[in-house]
Image: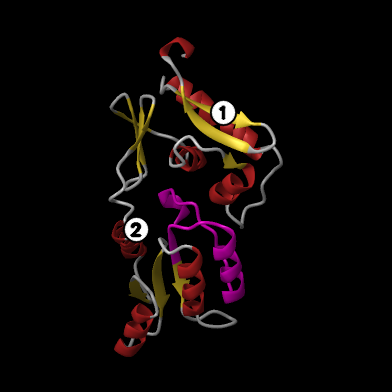
Amino acid sequence: MTWSGFVVDRVGTVRDALFAVSSARYDLAVLDRRLPDGDGLQVIPKLRQAQPESRVLILSALDDIDQRIGGLDAGGDDYLVKPFDLDELMARVRATLRRGGVSATPPVAIGALAFDPATRSVSIHGRAATFHRRELALLEALVRRGGRVVERDALLSEIWGFDDEVQPNALTNLVSRLRARLTEYDAGVDIVMVRGVGYFASETSAAER
């Protein structure tokens, strides 16, 4: 899913999944029914308690009707039977996110930039703007907070997830690259550091550009 621009945390057990949903915010959880230490459905109650707005897509080779109904009744928003085509998986991911209300969220505007949560697309001065995957993830994390400070640890989790080994200066370098791209586009947006805490997105005046 990372090739489609999503930031993904991968875990292989129910135990690790329970830890993940208690440690980070997710728009969507894709759960397998057969994990080494149990059924992925065991994660749903914890996810619903901690993040009621998150959506759940269940993947399973358990394809009889009772199993599918059981998965949906347990709190799944969709149920995809293995084997499946990756294009169908991504279509169901997008549809599940839309049902979760992501598509109902209006574009977020700051400066000359508009971010559309439904399509994860950016326009600047009314024209499409492209960013590398992690630049887009950082921009999304900041603009969706509406100018509030986002702590460094939260950004590291959202952008790199649990799987990647992150270098100490990775976030600082990413912020620098994103600032340069925003300046290149004349977006009227700056990424401001709050020392020892994190970053927030701020609109700049025409005189500051």
Measured as percent of width and height from the top left, residue 103 is found at: 29, 51
- At 51% from the left and 56% from the top, the residue drawn is 25
| Residue type (three-letter) at the residue carrying disc 1 | Val
In this rendering, the answer to whether 62 lies above or below 125 is: below
> Which residue is drawn at the image coordinates 37% and 63% (left, top)?
86
Numbered mark located on residue 75 in the image: none
Q: In this view, does 4 lie above or below 183?
A: below
**What kind of residue is marked 2?**
Leu
| Mark 2 or 1, closer to the camera | 1
The answer to the question of whether label 2 and label 1 lie on touching residues, with beta carbons closer than 8 A, is: no
Mark 1 secondary-structure assignment: strand
- The crowd level at tag 2 (other Cα within 10 Å; few <14, some 14-19, many 20+) is many
**Screen quadrant of the N terminus:** bottom left
Q: Which residue lies furthest to the top in this view?
A: 207
Q: Nearer the viewer, residue 54 or 61?
A: 54
Reading the image, the residue beneath label 2 is 97
Relative image position of residue 170 (x, y in whole percent): 65, 39
Q: Position of residue 196 (x, y in %)?
A: 69, 36
Q: Is residue 170 magenta?
A: no
Q: Is mark 2 on a helix, strand or loop?
A: helix
Residue 4 is covered by the magenta coloring: yes
Looking at the rendering, the stretch of residues picked out in magenta corresponds to 1-29
Return the residue at label 1: 192
Q: Which of the two discs, 2 and 1, labels the residue nearer the N terminus?
A: 2
- Viewer-nearest residue: 119 or 22: 22
Residue at image coords 44%, 37%: 146
Could you tell whether 189 is left or right of 9 in the image? left
Neighbor class of circle 1 (other Cα within 10 Å; few <14, some 14-19, many 20+) is some
Residue located 39% across and 25% down the image: 111
User: CA–CA distance between discs 2 and 1?
Assistant: 30 Å
141 left or right of 20?
left
